[in-house]
Image: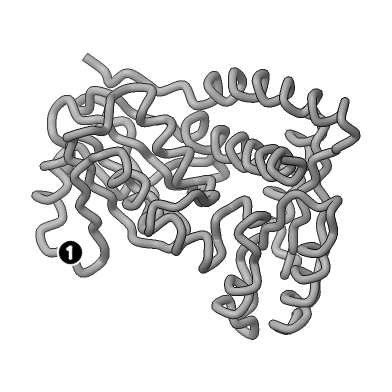
Amino acid sequence: MKAALLDGKGLAKTRKEELAKRVDQLHTQGVVPKLSVILPTNDEASLAYFRAKQRAAEKLGIVVEGQTFDAPSTEELTTCIETWSADPNVSGIMVETPVPETVDMQVVRNSLPAGKDVDGAGIESLGRLLSGKPAFSPATAAAALVLAETAVGMAGKHAVIIGRSLVVGKPLALLLLAKNATVTVCHSKTQDLTTVAKQADILFVAVGKAGFVTSDMVKPGALVIDIGTNVVDGKLVGDVDAASVSDVAGGLSPVPGGVGPLTTTLLLEHVVQAAERAIG
């Protein structure tokens, strides 16, 4: 029996319908939610992601604006963030990646105000997430968790995360712990990764390598959440070898159509939530 595919696209559609109602309510109060995005390079992939956010936001009545930089300094980015932080018309702020090596991202993250840090990239936001205080979590990590929860409960489950990035792996571990899962985080130095991965009730994969996880790494009946996005021969594929894993897993998030659609939706939910908080 093939693994059940999780419908991230359908879930995103349902959540957008609910989000549109909240945006309409804000509009009646004279508030237009607005996301301001720093585009620190002319990287075409980053610009494509930005335009996708713009299109999705426009359909909901949310404004997404971008500020493009050509080889920016750290000070230029922090000055831009400070300006937006003080602007009551800006609900959320985020920095698109990749960022040039000349920029000190630690300093940039420190400058992101938690109340407008809608993608949870700032040091204050991550600290709040660690300590269990209210904060916006990174949208991709949150999307992976939301999608997994459509299939199984987290409490008492053994969740294994392959990948320890500050954007996905580490915040996802914190979100899972808050749901009372038992969490193992794997990385490039993990010994006998196949054995560790096969212990997972829920396996989250975010390594940026196409087809990295194969059927021998998956416990029969486990839920596999593929967070990877890779382009192979012009096609978008995940970090999981879906053809082989689908014969073993109980559930699988597809790429495309799984975590991706939910990520943008949750980011826009955070923007709306920030706008709602701003007016009390």
Residue at 72%, 42% (x, y): give it: 53
Is residue 96 rendered to the left or right of residue 236? right
If the image is split into quadrants, where does the C terminus sit?
A: top right
Q: Position of residue 225 (x, y in %)?
A: 35, 37
Residue in the image at 59% along x and 71% along y: 109
Which quarter of the figure has residue 248?
Answer: top left
Q: Say which element carries label 1.
A: loop
Q: Residue 83, relative to residue 10: is it above or below?
A: below
Residue drawn at x 18%, y 44% as measured from the top left: 182
Q: Residues within 10 Å of mark 1 (few under 14, many from 20)?
A: few
Q: Name the residue furthest front.
A: 280
Q: Position of residue 187 (x, y in %)?
A: 26, 62
Coordinates of residue 115 in the picture (x, y in percent): 64, 55
Q: What amino acid is labelled 1 in the image?
A: Thr
Eyeballing the image, is 263 above or below 149?
A: below
- Left or right of 116? Residue 214 is left
Residue at image point 15% right, 56% down: 193
Relative horizontal placement of residue 93, taking residue 249 as reference (left or right): right
Q: Is residue 276 toward the left or the right of residue 134 in the image?
A: right
Residue under numbered circle 1? 190
Count of marks overlaid on the render: 1
Q: Is residue 194 visible?
A: yes
Residue lying farthest top?
1
Q: Position of residue 162 (x, y in %)?
A: 28, 53
Identify the coloring: one colour
Image quarter (top left, top right, bottom left or bottom right) of the N terminus: top left
